[in-house]
Image (spheres, rainbow, N blue to C red):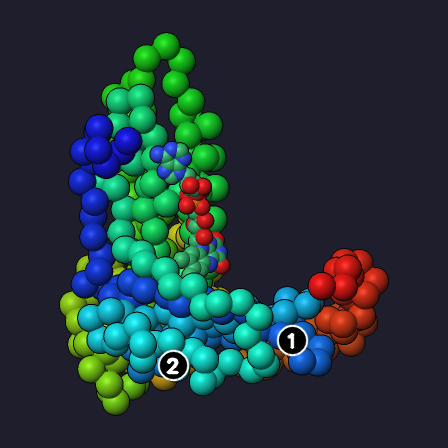
Amino acid sequence: LIDGAMQSEFVDWHHYLPCDRAIAVQTKLAGAPDPFTRSTADDAGWRWRIPLQTRLGNGHVYSSDFMEQDEALQKLLAGVEGEPVTQPLPLKFRTGHRKAFWDKNCVAIGLAGGFIEPLESTSIHLTQMGIQRLVNLWPGRGCNRSEIAQYNALMTADYERLRDFIVLHYNATEREDTEFWRYVKHMAIPDSLAAKLEIFRSNGRLIPSPEDLFTPHSWLAVMLGQGLYPQNYDVLVDRVPAQALLKNMQMLRMSVAKTAGSMPTHEEFIRRYCQASAA
Ligand SMILES: Cc1cc2nc3c(=O)[nH]c(=O)nc-3n(C[C@H](O)[C@H](O)[C@H](O)COP(=O)(O)OP(=O)(O)OC[C@H]3O[C@@H](n4cnc5c(N)ncnc54)[C@H](O)[C@@H]3O)c2cc1C
């Protein structure tokens, strides 16, 4: 409806996020499941490995500009642990969004409104934001043009913030060993991300945005994790005596260790609260 009847333009971000294909396959789980998802960079994208209680979900997200499906499938199957229990499922997608999520009496939510490749599993969050913002601006009699404009501006900002965070994962890479990684390392990035990187590079500041799903901790992890360090530090740091800072950090470390020490293991937690019935 949004595409055909309303002809709402699609804002295509393929040039920022060239991954546009995925292949998914499930495999048998051998041993206890890890309590985390693993995402591993590959030659033209990345692979996921998601441990569930009874099986592993695996997938390969790649850019069809840089890799053929046969090679992507081969790489996926070569990288999985355990025997496949499903046929590999190929998927196609486009990263981007409708310029107008809401037009007249038609509102596009979920995939109808847009999609950001699944590196940080953000789609259901965006669907939720679409619903929440619509409820906040729920129309009475007729649709108010200003409210529609407000909805579209807020949704566009939600998409752009998440886009920037995902683009950072690629653009901050140190890899230059394949055509794909050379492309993402040297591509033009959105101005909003460039400004954020410039501030961080110059003084280590990450200005929190209350609407951002990803807090400065997440941004910092991706930046430092890829070797992106600031040239200088935030001047506000000088106002805190080094001894006090050290003491705070030590207390934080102790508090984390104490909490972690009192927690059940992943296996124990599952057994106690949410054991799946045998597959
Ligand atoms: C590889 C991959 C991994 C992902 N991982 C995650 C993740 O970890 N976390 C996350 O949040 N999201 C993830 N997503 C995204 C998530 O799957 C989607 O955001 C979500 O399924 C979209 O839901 P939807 O209802 O908008 O669309 P859909 O799930 O596609 O539902 C649309 C429904 O509408 C029906 N339909 C279509 N046309 C018509 C019509 N004309 N009339 C009637 N019915 C119609 C379809 O049959 C379908 O049932 C991932 C996506 C991919 C591709």
Write down the quadrant of residue 143 in the picture. Answer: top left
Residue at x-position 22% and y-position 57%: 13
Is residue 229 at least partly visible in the picture? no
Under mark 1, the amino acid is Leu
In this rendering, the label closer to the viewer, 1 or 2: 2
Pick the front one: 21 or 86:
86
Mark 2, other Cα within 10 Å: few <14 / some 14–19 / many ≥20: few
Q: Which residue is mark 2?
A: 74
Mark 2 vs ligand 1: CB below 8 Å = no
Residue at x-position 29% and y-position 66%: 19
Residue 39 location (% of width, % of height): 46, 74
Identity of the residue furthest to the top in this view: 141
Under mark 2, the amino acid is Gln
Residue at x-position 48% and y-position 67%: 87
Could you say which disc has been placed on residue 29 in the image? 1
Residue 44 location (% of width, % of height): 29, 77
Write down the quadrant of residue 223 in the picture. Answer: bottom left
Residue 206 falls left or right of residue 258: left
Residue 236 falls left or right of residue 35: left
Is residue 191 at least partly visible in the picture? yes
